[in-house]
Image: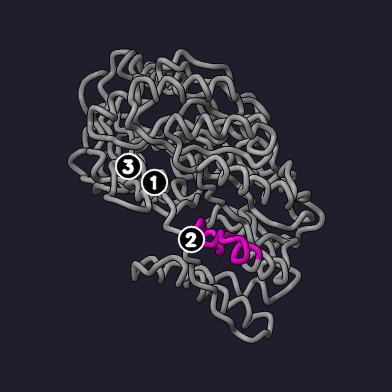
Amino acid sequence: MRGPGQILLISTYELGHAPHGLALPAAFLERAGFQPTCLDLSVEPLDPARAAGARLVAISVPMHTALRLGLEAGRRALAAAPAARLAFHGLYAPLHADLLAGAGAVAVLGGECEAELVALAEAMERGQADLSSFLHRGPDRLPLRRLDYPVPSRAGLPPLSRYARLDPGAGPMRLAGYTEASRGCKHLCRHCPIPAVYRGRFVAVPAETVLADVAGQVAAGAEHVTIGDPDFLNGPGHALRIARALRERFPDLTFDFTAKVEHLVCHPGLLPELRRCGALFVTSAVESLSDRVLARLDKGHTRADALRAFELCREAGLTLRPSLLPFTPWSTLDELLDLLATFAERGLLAHLDPVQLSIRLLIPPGSLLEGAPDIAFEGLDRSGLTWRWRHPDPRMDALQPRIAAAAEGGAARREEPLATIGRIRDLALAAAGLPHRHVRVLAPDQRRVPRLTESWFC
């Protein structure tokens, strides 16, 4: 089984960047003597000829969209290689173990699972018939200890030019790479799938492994890198060591990272140094400006904290790009209008991707919100991979798909984000029965802000 083509690693979507969910498992398997083939369906087709010789097909499902696409990819891969065994791995796999087993998976792996993927391949190589120990039904007892991480193997992936690029706001686009300096998260936000798997733990990847991963991508042309940890500042000392080393080794390289509002506010002294080390922007799960909603989600920050985080980042020369969750069972239409008005007054609308104004709360099986008594559940949507819920205000349920369509249409037309946000605000005002007003244009002292060319969503 260790020969070429015997193991096919498939990714379907990873937010527009080169898939870490292929590169890291490939490195583990190669270190064990296997020669896996990688296939990224976000940028290349599923060629039946490439799948035909596979004995093991392992599909990476680190997020909701990837899982939905991965189910179809699994069906197509098994059609091309009927004798192959099917495995799913990644954050969303153990949350949907029964569904994946029903789709033909013999293995469902999550947490720090790459060593288990190697063990699965070795068990198959030995001819082991009973593989039930690799089928983890739910997040209990998943491996969470730090592994001996090899440098991710990216040689089998498409070139960086096939993926999202950095739009710096001024000047030409730049090739962008991706790496991870830690995994898991020590926080327990109730709507996030990470706590359901990692249960408040995170593990740091050795700095030398991260730097070697970045070095390979810089050699391939990357001028910017996304540090894709759930929260880069879970370990602030680790984060600073990596940022300083990146600046020393690659003085022209820029990067972006993700961090909680709580950490941005609690560690303001880190931000100017991260900017000096090359950070251009930070993504943060602001989610809402309603203290009531933030408390219900157990976000660990308040409205005032979120607005303070924008100020601190601006003072440090960083752009804060928020992810939002405007449609929850507790959010109101007035709160959505307030969010738009507050962002407009503070000159923050340019920091938004319009799609962020359309996001509706997903509650997958295993979520910390599953069964919450103040949510009007309407059953499990097996095709949508989430529990259905109804908003107490019918206007919100009617408005969300309209905003989603406006965001999608604006992206398809390559419309300026502020123009799309203006359309979205008109929809929200109309839903509230208020006169339509257009969002103010950028003030003279504002400019385009840095962003990746792929809109952020899960």
Residue drawn where x is 72% and y is 60% of the image: 377
Task: Return the x and y of residue 188 as percentages of the image width and height.
Answer: 70, 36
CB atoms at circles 2 and 3 under 8 Å apart?
no
At label 1, which amino acid type do we have?
A: Tyr
Residue 391 seen anywhere in this rendered image of the structure? yes
Q: Nearer the viewer, residue 454 or 100?
A: 454
Cα separation between marks 2 and 1: 37 Å
Q: Which residue is label 3 attached to?
A: 78
Task: Return the x and y of residue 83 as percentages of the image width and height.
Answer: 30, 34
- Foreground mark, 2 or 3? 2
At label 2, which amino acid type do we have?
A: Asp
Element under disc 1: loop
Q: Which residue is label 2 attached to?
A: 445
Residue 51 seen anywhere in this rendered image of the structure? no
Span shown in magenta: 342-359
Residue drawn where x is 68% and y is 76% of the image: 395
The first of marks 2 and 3 along the sequence is 3
Task: Return the x and y of residue 351 as percentages of the image width and height.
Answer: 51, 56
At label 3, which amino acid type do we have?
A: Leu
Residue 13 tag number: 1
Within the magenta stretch, is there residue 353? Answer: yes
Residue 152 in the image: above or below residue 309 = above
Q: Nearer the viewer, residue 35 or 240?
A: 240
